[in-house]
Image (tube, rainbow, N blue to C red):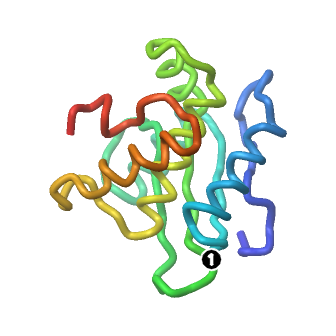
Amino acid sequence: MSPDDSTLLFRRAGQGLDRKSLRLTAKRLEREVAQDRRFRCLLTDDRELKRLNSQFFNKSYPTDVLSFPEADPEAPFLGEMAISVERAAEQARECGHTVEQEIGILMLHGALHLLGMDHERDRGQMKRIEIRWRQKLGLPPGLIERAGA
């Protein structure tokens, strides 16, 4: 994929998603959170996330979001992320919000990782930033908050 392609790619993402709303969310994240830097987001299924997680992180299970930052942190293209729409739908049901809101939460989380943040090592910095952006964007509680990390 080249940085000039569409921001969102739908592959085995299921039916019924509000694609226009998701594209607007992605563009807003690029504009506001990433300060006009672009990223690409693949919306797909658990099988694809399991394959990517195994191939790149040596973990043989599906997950909700994976991030693949660009090697050059100063490049105008941040990198790519992949989101499991199946995981997003399940998490949305558990949390009582829409799948589009959950995908927005996952895209925000992935974008912060593409910007170089790491909640496993930063003593809460990414969590605080994610909470601020989530509130500004009108999204429900995010991944880090729900995990209690």
Residue 146 image point, x, y percent: 32, 29
Q: Quadrant of the N terminus?
A: bottom right
Q: Quadrant of residue 117?
A: bottom left
**Quadrant housing residue 118:** bottom left
Residue at mark 1: 77
What percent of the width, then of the height, locates residue 65?
Answer: 47, 44
Image: 125 above or below 2: above
How many dots with numbers? 1
Mark 1 residue crowding within 10 angstroms, few (<14) / some (14–19) / many (20+): many
> Residue at the location (31% across, 50% down)?
128
Give how far across and how far down residue 102 sits, in percent.
55, 31
What residue is shown at x 66% (from left), y 42% (from top)? 43
Residue type at tag 1: Phe
Percent position of residue 139, x then y: 54, 34
Residue 61 higher or lower than 80, as above or below: above
If the image is split into quadrants, where does the C terminus sit?
top left
Give the left or right position of residue 138, taking residue 135 as reference.
right
- The residue lying at 84 percent from left, 39 percent from top is 20
Please tell me whether mark 1 sits on a helix, a strand or a loop: strand
- As drawn, 114 above or below 19: below
107 lies left or right of 112: right
Residue drawn where x is 51% and y is 58% of the image:
111
Q: Which quadrant would residue 80 be assigned to in this image?
A: bottom right
